[in-house]
Image (tube, rainbow, N blue to C red):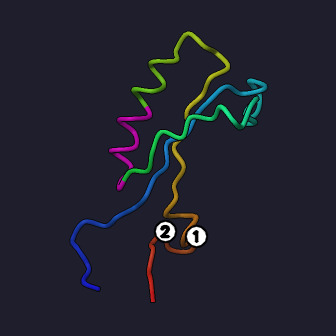
């Protein structure tokens, strides 16, 4: 598989209503908004910002960016296949 010059560092944008402002526990997992997976942080950040601004009046609602590339390869942040 050929490497491209642009690294694909996957990021997930997810959000929903939290059960408490002190933690990151969602009040209802069935209502979690899985916004999408993005190829880089900048793309994920733009979507995260839009979703966060849409819910600014709901103090219990939060959106997060999850660094999926770090979960796939926690030592280097890279994803490699055999």
| Rendered image quadrant of residue 22 | top right
Farthest residue in the top direction? 57
Q: Quadrant of the C terminus?
A: bottom left
Left or right, 6 with reference to 9: left
Dominant secondary-structure state across the stretch colored magenta: helix
Q: Which residue is mark 2?
A: 77
Farthest residue in the left direction? 5
| Rendered image quadrant of residue 57 | top right
Identity of the residue drawn at 43% across and 58% down? 10
Give how far across and how far down residue 25 sits, in percent.
75, 36
Left or right, 24 with reference to 35: right
Identity of the residue drawn at 76% across and 29% down? 27
Identity of the residue drawn at 65% across and 31% down? 31
Q: Quadrant of the N terminus?
A: bottom left
Instruction: Tell me whether circle 2 and circle 1 mark residues in contact (CB < 8 Å).
Output: yes
> Could you give the CA–CA distance between mark 2 and mark 1, rounded to whole angstroms?
5 Å
Identity of the residue drawn at 51% across and 55% down? 67
Question: What residue span does the magenta drawing correspond to?
Answer: 39-48
Q: Is residue 46 magenta?
A: yes
- Give the class, few, some or many, for how many residues have Cα within 10 Å of label 1's Cα (few <14, many ≥20): few
Q: Secondary structure at mark 1?
A: loop
Looking at the image, residue 15 lies above or below residue 52: below
Q: Secondary structure at mark 2?
A: loop
| Rendered image quadrant of residue 47 | top left
Q: Which residue is mark 1?
A: 74
């Amino acid at each position: 598989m050929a490497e491209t010059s642009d690294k694909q560092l996957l990021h997930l944008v997810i959000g929903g209503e939290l059960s408490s402002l002190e933690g990151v526990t969602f009040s209802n997992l069935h209502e979690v908004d899985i916004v999408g997976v993005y190829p880089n942080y900048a793309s994920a950040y733009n979507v995260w910002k839009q979703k966060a601004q849409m819910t600014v009046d709901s103090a219990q609602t939060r959106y997060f960016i999850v660094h999926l590339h770090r979960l796939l390869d926690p030592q280097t942040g890279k994803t490699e296949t055999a």
